[in-house]
Image (cartoon, grey):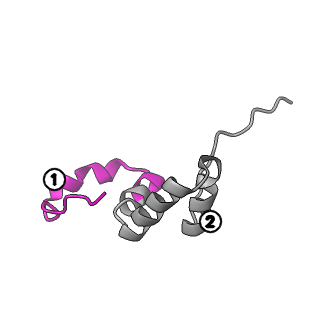
């Protein structure tokens, strides 16, 4: 997935970045990384879906936080 970079000089194209969280901003840049895109594509085709998240986490240092466990006290 190669993004359309024809309007990269248009600040209006990037106004949405002002409201992003740190993880959203990281995703915006990671998804433009050709090496990540190629690696994910290969892993998605070959990896067991149950281990895909772990493999991506290990290769790219990503975290996929889940909901915290409910505990009663």
Q: Residue furthest top?
A: 72
Instruction: Please tell me which residue is depicted at 27% across the width and 60% down the height of the picture.
Output: 2
Q: Position of residue 7 (x, y in %)?
A: 13, 60
Q: Residues within 10 Å of mark 1 (few under 14, many from 20)?
A: few
Q: Residue at x 27, y 49 (%)?
A: 16
Left or right? Give the position of 30 relative to 52. left
Residue 10, magenta (yes or no): yes
Please state the horizontal and vertical placement of residue 4, each as a whole percent of the image.
Answer: 19, 58
Q: Say which of 22 and 46 sits in front.
A: 46
> Which residues are the magenta region?
1-25
Where is 35 relative to 65, above or below? below
The answer to which of 56 and 30 lies nearer the viewer is 56
Q: To which residue does mark 1 refer? A: 12
Q: Is residue 6 left or right of residue 65?
A: left
Q: Residue furthest right?
A: 73
**Where does label 2 land, which residue?**
58
């Amino acid at each position: 997935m190669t993004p359309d970079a024809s309007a990269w000089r248009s600040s209006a194209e990037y106004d949405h970045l002002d409201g992003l969280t740190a993880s959203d901003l990281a995703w915006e840049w990671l998804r433009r990384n050709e090496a990540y895109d190629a690696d994910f594509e290969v892993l998605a085709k070959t990896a067991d879906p149950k281990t895909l998240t772990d493999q991506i986490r290990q290769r790219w240092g990503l975290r996929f936080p889940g909901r915290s466990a409910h505990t009663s006290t």
